[in-house]
Image: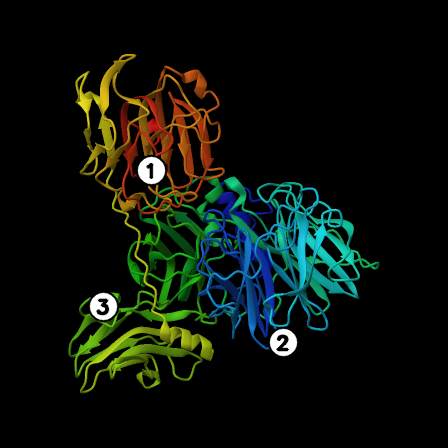
Amino acid sequence: MNRIYLVAAFLLLGAVSGFARKKHDAPGTGNPVIPGYFADPTIKKFGDTYYMYATTDGSGAGFGPAQVWTSKDFVNWTLMPMNWPDSHWIWAPDVIRHTDGRYYYFYCQPCIIHCGVSETPRGPWKNILGESEAVLVPDRFVTNAITLDGQTFVDDDGSVYLYWGTWGIYKGFGCGAGKMTPDLKGFTETRLIPNTEAVDFFEAPFVLKRNGIYYFMYSSGSCHDHTYRVQYATSDHPLGPYEYKGCILETNEDGTVHGPGHHSILKEGDDYYIVYHRHDNPHSNRGFHRQLCMDKMEFAADGSIRKVIPTHKGVGALAPSVVKSENLALGAGVRASSCYDDNFRAEYAVDDNNGTLWRPRGMGQEWLEIDLGSSREIQTVWTQFEYGTQFYQYLIETSVDGKHWSVFADKRNNHLAGSPMVDFGKAEARYVRLTFTGGQKNGFGGAVWNVKVFGGIEEALPQQWLGLTAADWDGREWRNNEGMLGGAFVLKEGAARTCRIEGRDALMLEPGTVLEYCHSLLSPSKEHTLSGLVYRSGKWRSYETEHCLSQGMISLRSGNEPLVITNLRYYNWKLEPAERAYDAATDVVRLPAADCRKRGLVVSITADDFAVGDTVPYLTNRGVKGYFEALKAPVVVKETEGKKAFHFDGSQLFRSSFSLPATLQDNAPYTLEAWVLNDSIAENECVADFTTSHDELEKIMLVNGTEPRCGVINHYGWYEDAGYKGMKELTGRWQHIYICFDGRMEQVYINGEQVSGKDIQLLVKPSQFVTLGRNAEGEWPFTGYLHSLKLWDEYIPLQGRK
């Protein structure tokens, strides 16, 4: 679209919707580069393809999974999953192509570094030391260098150096560095680059060489706030000593480029580009919703690095665009079922800006409707959901008049994660409606970075078009629920059923059975990979599938013998032999969809059900069916300050016969209400622990303590917990505690006063039981009175509580 018309369209849109855009939320900005939350980027170019390796953010403290983004033009990126590592933390990945032609993948867990090897930059990877969790660089391998943020540098002679470090601010600390052995399994020499050379060194080292000068670049400040920045020092040797030169990248004046750091450098010809992460806008609590950006980096005549001015515009395309059609949705009219608030408007879904997000208010079925202005031909729709690493289920419809709708793409049973989600069809329509219906995890809703609508067929992005397992058979159709094209194999003749052979579920086609899958984009003449697994002669074998493919169709025929098949895959690009071998030995992953069937009141107990003086070893739950049983001493019902209450003296521990429903897992909304009186408030006293997990962000625990950080609600988080500085003043008084969480904001009230309100994110796992009087580990005994306790698996604001 002509830039003048584009600007005019958005000026009109802003006037109609009544809000003025700022630089960071202007349409079509080039930063962030990637739609989603990612951090610690390493940018590489192998062949004609750019690869962006990064920490998966926005899921606690970078809790995976492994992935890589690829692009041919540096504008249109595709998220591709990787097989390894499968650890809890996958931080600060880096990849190099070594002299042996293979690719080496370095990544960190706190506080160690691992290394994998592969024949391709996408994997499949395996640890170069054998065992999947084998450690290449243990913590403090170099004295006073905490092992994290490993980054390689390859010198002109092919020598490989590795640099690492975090929290290098302490006296005598700094960055670990070493020259690696040719097999990359060890070091020939190492050194500490002290923070007296790399002044204020905190973490994230990166080294480049230009005109014989080694530039040691690194991040300083706190990664959680505006002080995070990039500095550098120089030397005539890769291991130093280095001379400090100054800061080259920091938070901008209005704070919309906030905490830029942990960078890497891309060299294209004579040009240098710095790729870094920054915090999202509006800034999320804790600073773990980071996004990737790129700006040009320039050198002065004396070889010094000029100060980088971080921009929202970015750099743009570095090669011809792979997209040939106009994005019809850009600047189009839009309306939605709801918007969370003014920071997450519906207009943001059609502005081609990876830093702005439409977030609906609810977690159920929410829709976004785009008005193209006139009837247009539509053949492709790209949807970039908030989290590309988890799957979403949705429906795309089109309409000429906004009243009568036709299905364009039905992904209500989709189990494939990806970004963008690409849907093909053929329609003449003015309106396009996207309806979110569910997904992999609770509490995330159908938030969208961008929806792009094209009149042409845009199929250039490398993706898995088909993915089918035995679980996708519904009796008449074999549904393509793990493939981008959707649709299904239709039973044309014969019969089929699921079976299990040698530990693997499969679909058995009885003799004479025919299944057909039709899609106009399938073609034996286009680059592709089609594969599957079949059981023959007592073994699972790779299925030679090319004979099944014809123009627009894949046909599976069993012949005179049954055909036992599973893991049918079709990619729209040619896999390398190592990738094909991996697929032949690995099942298609089919994760379950989140349970969204709300139960309402889950936990409900009250002392009003008993008489004063009762000794109570069992408490019937008035929520989900079950009870609480005393594992130690029972409670006695007493009356205090006008209320009947269960008296806990620190010796009690009750455990439920029931577990929390799946509707409270992940980041699910919840509401918690309790009446508590504590006549001797200790630092940490657990009233109720609703989760048995003890990992970070996996806990929902009601606490009544003086600990100012987590004395009311504890999630085992750093910033996500909440306390109350005035708790000691409530000693001997009834506290009405009310906590409500809508999937983004958690609000904590005590006696009607809000004592905390902040955006958080939870990662609640399946829980075995609920405890009263102590936490699930049997610690933090409660000494006080509990009148009542209620928990709902839904968000109920205090103002709406009856």
Marks 1/2: CA–CA distance:
52 Å
Expressed as whole percent of the image width and height from the top left, the position of residue 486 reads 32, 67
The residue wearing badge 3 is: 473
- Residue linked to disc 2: 99
Q: CA distance from mark 3 to mark 2?
A: 47 Å
Say what amino acid the circle numbered 2 marks. Answer: Thr
Mark 1 and mark 3 residues within 8 Å of each other at the beta carbon: no
Q: Is residue 125 above or below residue 356?
A: below
Res. 430 image quadrant: bottom left
Q: Position of residue 655 (x, y in %)?
A: 25, 35
Mark 3 neighbour density, 10 Å: few (under 14) some (14–19) many (20 or more): many
Q: Is residue 783 left or right of residue 285?
A: left
Amino acid, disc 3:
Trp
Q: Quadrant of the N terminus?
A: bottom right
Q: Could you say whether the residue bearing mark 2 is in a helix, strand or loop?
A: loop
- Position of the C terminus, as image quadrant, is top left
Give the camera-side residue of 14 and 419.
419
